[in-house]
Image (cartoon, grey):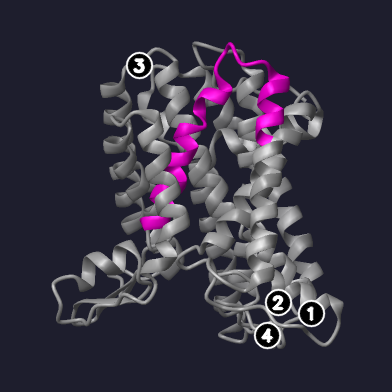
Amino acid sequence: MMPIPLARSASGPTRRLLSIDALRGLVILIMLLDHVRDMFFLHVPVGDPMDVAAISPALFFSRTLAHLCAPVFIGLAGVSAWLYGNAGHDRRAVSGFLFRRGLFLVVLELTLVGYAWTWRLPPQVIYLQVIWAIGLSMLALAALVWLPRAALVAVGVALVAGHNLLSPLHFPVDSAWHVPWAILHDRTWIEVADGLRVRTSYPVLPWIGVIALGYAAGPWFATGVPARVRQLRLAGWGVAMLAGFAGLRALNGYGQEQKWMPGADALHTAMSFLNVTKYPPSLLFLLLTLGTGCLLLAWLERVQGGRAARCLAVFGAVPMFFYLLHLYVLQGLYQFCVYRWGLNQGRVFGFDHVWQLWLVAAVLALVLWPAVRWFAALKAARRDWRWLKYF
């Protein structure tokens, strides 16, 4: 297999970025699994929070695994922004790039991404999901990069750790604060016009804290930082966040509105303990997922020379290309099934077992690999095509 050149920072060797791309690639494949569930497991609905007593452990843990995706994407977006600046760009250039890319992602969510989910023109419903959240987080970071690093850390910690205090705050639809607060912290519906509603699926306020902390962690990847030191920092913070999650969750106190309860057996008790809120992400959700993400990144730093890590890095080098590609492939497959068999999911087509979702996701990853590999090579080779860096 021909090796794929990866994006290179002017200040450091490629290998330091391979682990980041590999982690992004890993969560992209997990995301693929979750989106196969979205398309072909609709007859087994999963709410949020999940009903631990009503769903199978296999479905619960598959869905919980997908919780890693958004925090890792957004945290690594912050790290990548710092790496962009460290490659010879001043703060003004970093801020401008973040502003342009954030605006691009917002427009993308409202157009190509939204259509891939709803398959309707004009749309009747617009879901403001993860690409929207990343875009708005980048727009916010474009302003926050002007802060000193200590102040940036303080803002990030305050938003991640303190936003749960705002959960009781809601505004009625006739209030001037209803729309901005729905975008920032209140997952709800916005009535735009007759026949058009907007769902703020990913309230953005805590995600701004995540991208700020990712940017603040960027210096760990500087040229002069030994790999061993970086790995220890990642592992240390990963363990600390998971310990904080376990301690706060055991107390059933701050950081998660939905309390855990003993279940019928140890497995269901564990499911209740791990059942954390994603919309907006609670403090415990972020401690669990970001802690796990730090440990995975520390591990990938150690094994990044391996074949599996390099394959994952190919997926992670072109995340937006893969995101759009897999959405349209899945939607095309779903529309073909509807055309062929009608609206009979669960009776004629679709899947009844979670292992089938894993199998289909694995097959699709292999099928999409040549296109992803081709685009990654194109992106690495054509530095003169500036638009490629947005994908």
Q: What's the residue at 39%, 54% (across, down)? A: 133
Tag 4–tag 1 contact (CB < 8 Å):
no
In the displayed structure, would residue 265 be above or below residue 23?
A: below
Q: What main secondary structure does the magenta stretch of the protein show?
A: helix
Q: Which residue is under mark 3?
A: 89
Instruction: Report the mark closest to the observer, 4 or 1.
Output: 1
User: Residue type at mark 1?
Assistant: His
Q: Which residue is under mark 1?
A: 268
Name the spot of residue 322 as percent of width and height, x first: 55, 45
Give the secondary structure at mark 4: loop
Badge 4 density bin: few <14, some 14–19, many ≥20, Cα 10 Å: some
Toward which corner of the image does residue 102 lie, by quadrant? top left
The magenta stretch is: 205-234
Nearest to N terminus: mark 2 or mark 3: 3
On residue 73, the disc is none
Name the spot of residue 85 as percent of width and height, x first: 40, 21
Measure the alpha-carbon separation of dots 2 and 3.
Answer: 46 Å
Q: Which residue is under mark 2?
A: 272
Q: Which residue is under mark 4?
A: 346
In the displayed structure, would residue 298 be above or below residue 285?
A: above
Measure the alpha-carbon separation of dots 3 and 4.
Answer: 53 Å
Instruction: Report the mark closest to the observer, 3 or 4.
Output: 3
Give the secondary structure at mark 3: loop
